Amino acid sequence: MEWLSAENVIAVVTAALGIVASLAVLWYERRVPRRTRIGYRVQLDTPVSSAERTGRAGVRLGFFQDNPQLSDATLVLLRIENDGSQSIADADYTGRELHGLMAEFTSRAVQGIAVTAPLDADHLLDHFTPAAGLRYAGDTVYLPRVPLNRGQHFKLLVLLTGGAVGDAIRVGGGIRDGGVYPNRSTTPDDTPPVFSRATRMITVLLTVCVVVLASIIVVRDDVRPPMGCAKGELTITGSTAFEPVAKDLAAKYMRDCAGSTVTVDARASREGLQELNERGAAAKGGAPALIALSDVPRRDSFPELIESQVAVSVYTLVVNDEVTLGDLTTEQVRAIYRGDLQAWDELPDGPENLPIVLASRKTGSGTRDIFRDRVLGGVYELAYSSDDCGTKDDRSAKVFRCELDSTDRVLATVAGTPGAIGYTELRAGAMPEGVHTLTLNGEAASPDTIADSDYPFREVEYAYTYGNPPASSLVASFLNYLLRGGGQDVVRTHGHLPCSSPKGRTICAGDAAQ
């Protein structure tokens, strides 16, 4: 028989040993950690109120024996930990509600809770706030979407009434590619070992089998892309303010997912939405391979478009370096754009003999709409009076103003025009030479402090598709990558606050409700 060669026999035997080793691991171990897994166990469940006999030890007095409302009180201490093989981010909790987990205490009512964490992970306590979803009602405690590195844990101490010690306790919730399961500790220090002795021995055997098998079988050239990737062509259009992020996202996705081509063709937010709507209508039931990024929501203009909140983008005023000011009030900015102030020396400490030049965006720009709504109080900018920002063509105009078609052109014009002022999103990298940012009402533009400050010049960035794209399409894959996958790191790197983060979720939800 042709297949009965020495190589094939060794390959079959090695494969069989590998299967046996795998089954042995399952037999020796009570569980196999999933990629993402949360484990929990009850470390304490005891009455704390009534006096009771404890055998030869005598009598134990309850802590709350003088409070009739707590006559049947019990204390439960729960340890909740990441005992899987991968870190768990807040986006890995799959429930639609704000909270991530629920701890249910059958037949008992929750009266109070306290949360503790180890000293090396006390930062976890910052997530346990009502705004992040922490609350209790009836027999249930609702826990926030707490990010946990591998092996990290926190403890939940719960004061209960009703029921009895030993009543069922369950922790549940949705975890991407994993789940929530009860576990147990096998060591006195309450820390389970990473691998048992049997597991280590079988792992060595399995590794030897795999190495032998790999040395026999010819490695094929075709390498499958990571899970969730899709092949094809996709275009990203819309916001020029978000263009640097979109370009880095496209490059990273194409590196991770071979066979995909993602092109960024940024124009302006409204133009991108218009193109997406037109191409979707022309597809007659199909979804075009196009995603439009927009600095502003679509309102009711394009009912067929589906929006997803991406991140909170922070914007800032920029001026030419010859303008020595570092701060403007909202009223001063409005006076400048109304034409009430036409030279910088009309402001306290402003430079002399330097006219104010407004480098603005064209109609259709989401950044321009945000500036109008958030800073100018809804008042439209006056008509432009210059084609190139170098010469004031309309001498009778109250303002010296030009319009530009991209954020990059605004920055370049402000850098090269003495006395120029403009607006742009806050970019993570350094501003061009010759430009500096202004604080507004004494508040600096920063995604790190936006949740706790009154800085007004910010908006949510949206991603739009025409209807719901097919789950297997490149549009759906890239959108998932942007909102929940590796693209989140790119968004953060460029100085934006993802809507999936705890602070970003609060801001994005608030803006959506307005």
Image: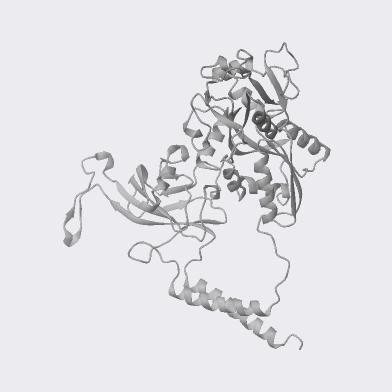
What residue appears at the point 68 percent right and 39 percent down from the top-left corner?
A: 243
Pick the residue in front: 255 or 483. Answer: 255
225 lies left or right of 107: right
What residue appears at the point 70 percent right and 73 percent down from the top-left corner?
A: 219
Residue 335 visible in this rendered orientation of the protein: yes
Extreme residue in the top direction: 396
Pick the residue in front: 252 or 88. Answer: 252
Residue 162 visible in this rendered orientation of the protein: no
What residue appears at the point 66 percent right and 35 percent down from the top-left corner?
A: 241
Looking at the picture, how far across and down is residue 22, in whole percent? 55, 74
Instruction: Say above or below: 303 vs 151.
Output: above
Pick the residue in front: 498 or 239. Answer: 239
Which quadrant does the C terminus fall into? top right
Instruction: Say above or below: 23 vs 284.
Output: below
128 lies left or right of 391: left
Instruction: Say above or below: 89 vs 112.
Output: below
427 lies left or right of 68: right
Looking at the picture, how far across and down is residue 461, in whole percent? 63, 36
Q: Which colour scheme is used?
A: one colour
Extreme residue in the front direction: 353
Looking at the picture, how far across and down is residue 340, in whole percent? 61, 12
Pick the residue in front: 200 or 100. Answer: 200
What residue appears at the point 67 percent right and 16 percent down from the top-left corner?
A: 399
474 lies left or right of 419: right
Q: Name the image quarter holding residue 267.
A: top right
Which quadrant does the N terminus fall into? bottom right
Looking at the picture, how far across and down is residue 164, in whole percent? 33, 51
